[in-house]
Image: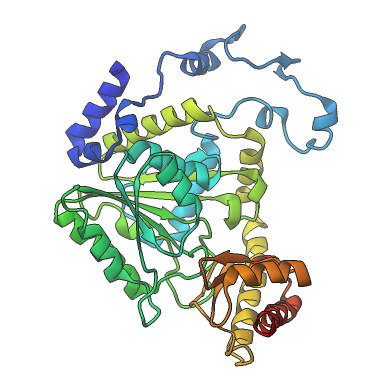
């Protein structure tokens, strides 16, 4: 094993042996080179005042070389903030700004010890980093039965982890904290589990209430007290889009440092929060009472980044940073939030009108981009295909009876027509 990896492992073991036990074999072996091209280039950037012949970019007239056909569209930005490689951890100013944003929006993070967010190539990349660092073949990865299908690829296919699902909802249609608890405690012999908490949930658009949140934290703490090492990941892709009386912040703050056997990891990003899906700017953040553990995890994360994408795109990081710094940012974001909330409220009003009750129920939703219908009389896939072919309406079929509808991409005044067409599609299939 490389001496740098050994040094990082020793630092983690010394300060929290439980976190060391959570690492996958890859997680134990990975490190960020301190004597490679990047570190030497960084040193030269500070000291090579005459000639800097280190990093593989081209320069011209004291700045990065670029084509005018590209820069004429980006002339509002300094070429140095667009064309050179961004650091593997991301632009330092962006990391600082995102951390300040996290503290502002998550009061429970105050007085908690957590690291500086590391820039990822959006949330999927952040989740894949978690998988690489912590998931070995056969390790349990626990998440609800209603979930984003990419978890299976990221943890199951890529890392051969053992996927453990539990029902998202109880019979009372609240978050199934007991199901989470049971799934966790079932890993006692294995001694390790990775938990993924995705709120607002994709596909249902559900965020638990405060009491449910406390039950989730209690379940994780109980597992840790039973001797299970728990990596608990908050997949906060749709963070901030809370339309009703639910949790209004990430559970990351509540989970941070609740037990030495619990490592809280937050994966979030500008992707959906700031409506910049194609920019691919996300973040991964670790919580620990030990600064040494945080530093070692950051170095290992940078090793994964260096070994896969090297670094994230510089222009989109600059764009997001400039937006966060703008005095108009909060107002514009509030305006978009109002649009999204209006759509969610309209959908709920339509569904509660009674006109569709013979065709479906719906799962609770109070946040995010989506809601999910529970079809009573037809199969979801048959309805999906029929809607697409006969009415030009696209939806997502999940299992036999669940149909996901993204109200996020439908204008509010078109929502009634959309649900009327879905209802008509059900009637068509019943008559066929």
Q: Is residue 404 visible?
A: no
Image quarter hosting the N terminus: top left
Q: Quadrant of residue 360?
A: bottom right
Up/down of 194 relative to 239, above or below: above
Residue 158, position as x, y percentages in the image: 44, 39
Q: Quadrant of residue 94?
A: top right
Q: How is the image coloured?
A: rainbow
Residue 49, position as x, y percentages in the image: 58, 10
Residue 24, position as x, y percentages in the image: 30, 35
Residue 418, position as x, y percentages in the image: 72, 76
Q: How many labels, in total?
A: 0
* Image position of 304 (left or right of 335): left
Residue placed furthest toward the front: 432
Image quarter hosting the C terminus: bottom right
Up/down of 59 relative to 21, above or below: above
Up/down of 431 relative to 191, above or below: below
Residue at (29, 29) in percent of width and height: 28
Residue at (74, 19) in percent of width and height: 65
Q: Quadrant of residue 14?
A: top left
Q: Is residue 118 visible?
A: yes
* Image position of 312 (left or right of 424): left
* Image position of 346 (left or right of 189): right
């Amino acid at each position: 094993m490389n001496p740098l990896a050994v040094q990082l492992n020793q630092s983690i073991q010394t300060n929290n042996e439980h976190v060391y036990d959570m690492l996958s074999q890859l997680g134990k072996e990975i490190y960020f080179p301190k004597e490679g091209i990047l570190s030497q280039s960084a040193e030269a950037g500070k000291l090579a005042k005459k000639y800097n012949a280190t990093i593989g970019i081209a320069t011209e007239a004291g700045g990065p070389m670029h084509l005018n056909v590209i820069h004429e569209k980006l002339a509002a930005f300094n070429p140095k903030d667009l064309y050179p490689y961004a650091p593997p951890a991301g632009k330092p100013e962006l990391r600082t700004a995102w951390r300040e944003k996290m503290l502002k929006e998550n009061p429970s993070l105050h007085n908690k010890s957590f690291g500086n967010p590391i820039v990822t190539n959006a949330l999927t990349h952040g989740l894949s980093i978690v998988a690489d660092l912590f998931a070995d073949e056969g390790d349990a990865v626990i998440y609800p039965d209603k979930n984003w299908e990419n978890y299976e690829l990221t943890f199951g296919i890529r890392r051969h982890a053992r996927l453990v699902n539990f029902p998202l909802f109880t019979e009372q249609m609240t978050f199934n904290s007991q199901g989470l608890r049971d799934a966790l405690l079932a890993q006692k012999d294995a001694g390790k589990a990775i938990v993924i908490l995705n709120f607002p949930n994709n596909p249902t658009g559900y965020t638990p209430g405060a009491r449910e949140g406390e039950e989730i934290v209690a379940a994780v703490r109980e597992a840790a007290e039973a001797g299970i090492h728990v990596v608990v990941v908050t997949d906060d892709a749709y963070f901030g889009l809370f339309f009703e009386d639910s949790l209004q912040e990430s559970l990351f703050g509540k989970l941070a440092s609740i037990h030495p056997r619990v490592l809280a990891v937050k994966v979030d990003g500008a992707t959906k929060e700031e409506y910049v899906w194609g920019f691919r700017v996300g973040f991964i953040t670790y919580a620990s009472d030990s600064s040494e553990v945080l530093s070692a995890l950051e170095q290992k994360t940078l090793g994964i980044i260096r070994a896969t994408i090297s670094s994230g795109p510089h222009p989109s990081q600059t764009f997001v940073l400039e937006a966060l710094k703008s005095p108009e940012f909060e107002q514009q974001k509030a305006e978009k939030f109002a649009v999204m909330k209006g759509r969610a409220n309209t959908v709920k009003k339509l569904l509660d009108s009674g006109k569709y009750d013979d065709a479906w129920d719906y799962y609770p939703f109070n946040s995010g981009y989506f809601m999910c219908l529970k079809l009573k009389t037809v199969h979801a896939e048959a309805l999906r295909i029929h809607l697409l072919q006969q009415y030009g309406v696209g939806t997502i079929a999940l299992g036999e009876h669940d149909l996901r509808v993204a109200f996020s991409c439908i204008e509010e005044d078109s929502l009634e027509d959309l649900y009327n067409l879905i209802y008509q599609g059900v009637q068509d299939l019943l008559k066929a």
